[in-house]
Image (cartoon, rainbow, N blue to C red):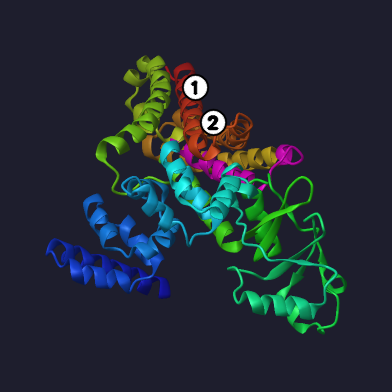
Amino acid sequence: MAEQIEFDQAHQTLQEITEALENGRFVHVRRQLQDMEPEDIASLLEASPRKARDVLWQLTDPEDYGEILDELSEDVKDALVSKMAPEKLAEATEGMDTDDVAYVLRSLPDDLSREVLAQMDAADRLRVETALSYPEDTAGGLMNTDVITIRGDVDVDVVLRYLRMKGELPEATDALYVIDDESKLIGHLSLSTLLTTQPDVPVSEVMDDADEAIKVDTKDSDIASLFERRNWISAPVVDENQHLVGRITIDDVVDVIREDAEHSMMSMAGMDDDEDTFAPVVKSARKRSVWLGANVLAALAAASVSNMFEATLEQMAAIAVLMTIVPSMGGVAGNQTVALVIRGLALGHIGDSNKRELLMKEAAIGFLNGILWALIIGAIVVVWKGEWLLGGIISAAMMTNLFVAGVAGVTIPVLLKKMNIDPALAGGMALTTVTDVVGLSVFLGLATLLIR
C-alpha cells in the first residue's frame, strides 16, 4: 500500500512538473526540485523525455549533482555528463564516495575522464585512480576508502576520544577496523562492543578476528551472496598481503543485487539493462536489431523443419492445425527449467558436484509432465478430430519434447556459462530453438511415417 502511494505521488509530481515546463514556469519547477530528495530527482529525470530532462538538469541545484548521478542508470548518466564541463563534473563528484566517482568516470570517454581527474585535489585523485585500477565487477571496484582504523594496543577510552575528535563517522559504519604496524588487518571492533566495554580495556581484548575480510579480487556476485547469507552491514576489503584497502557497505551491495536482477530481466528480451527509456530511436533500433536478427535465424531453423514435411501438411489439414502445440509446450516447460538454472548459477548453487543430480531431476520432471500432458492432449485430439492415430502421434511427440526440454533447460545455460556467454541473454532463445526443432521434427516425422 505504501509503495502504491509513493508511486502515485511520483506520477503526480512528474505530471505537475511536465505541465509547468510546458507553460514556461521554470522558477516554480526550480523550487519544486529544491524540495525534492536527490533519489527522487533521479527518478524524475529518468521518467522525462530527453528535452525536458536537459531543462530539469539545468534547473537542479549543482550541489545535488553528485548524489543524483549516483542514482541514475548508465545511459541517462552518460547523456547528462557528456554535456558538463570537466570542472563542473569534478565539483559534482566532491560529495560522492570513491567507488561512486569511479563508476561515473568509467562511463566517460578516456580524455574526459582524465580531464575530470586533473580537476581534483591530489588526495581525491589518488583514491579514485586506485579504485579505477581494479575491475569494476570486483571488490576493488565496489569498495570505498572511507575507513576508520585503530590500533589494538590502545584502550577503548582512547578510541572513544578519537571518534569524538573526528565528529562524524562514515556512512553505514558498524565497526572499526584494527590494523598492525604494517597496515595489515588483524580484527574489527563493533560499535556496540565499543560502547558497552569499560574505558580502560585494551582493544585487542575485545576485538573480533579478521576472518570475514573480503579479498580485493572477489567477484561482486559472490560479495552479494556473502552479505545476504551473513546479514552484514559492511565488510573490510584486503589485498593479497592482508593489507586493509577499503570496505564495502550494504548500499553498494543492494545496487549490485538490483542491477543483476534488471540485467537478467532485460537480457531475456535481448535488451540492455541500462538502456534509457527515452533513448534516441536510431540508437535503440540498432541495439535491438541484433537480437531480432538472431531470433530470425532461430525461426528459420524451425521453419526449415516444417518445409521438409510440406507434403504431409498438404495432405492432412489437421496436422497443420495441431503442429504448433508440441513446440509451444516444450518451450514453456524448457524456459521454466532455464529460469531455475540461471538463478542457481547466479547464486552459486549449481556446480560440478551437483549438475548431474539437477539434470536427472529436471529430466524426470520433463518425463512425468510429458506423460501427463500427452494423455490430456491426446485425448483432446481424439475427441476433437476423431483420429486415434493422430492422438497417439501428438502424445508421443509431446512426451519426447517435454523430456528434451527438461534436459536442454539444464545443459544449455551450463554450457553457455562455460563459454562465458550470459545464459540470461542467450539461454531462452537457444532453448526455444531446440524445442521448436525437436517438437516439429518428431510430430511431423511420425505423422509422415504412420499416416497414409
Q: Tell whether label 2 touches label 1 (CB within 8 Å).
A: yes
* Alpha carbons under labels 1 and 2: distance apart: 9 Å
Q: Which residues are magenta?
A: 328-357
Locate residue 59, reporting x and y percent: 26, 62
User: Looking at the image, can residue 272 be seen?
Assistant: no
The secondary structure type at the circle numbered 2 is helix
Q: Quadrant of the C terminus?
A: top left
Circle 2: residue type = Ala
* Residue on which disc 2 sits: 396
Magenta highlight on residue 346: yes
Most distant residue in the left direction: 23
Q: Is residue 205 above or below residue 312?
A: below
Q: Residue at x 48, y 62 (%)?
A: 95
Question: Left or right: 271 with respect to 12?
Answer: right
* Lower sequence index among marks 1 and 2: 2
Q: Is residue 260 above or below residue 208?
A: above
Magenta highlight on residue 292: no
Locate residue 110, reporting x and y percent: 45, 37
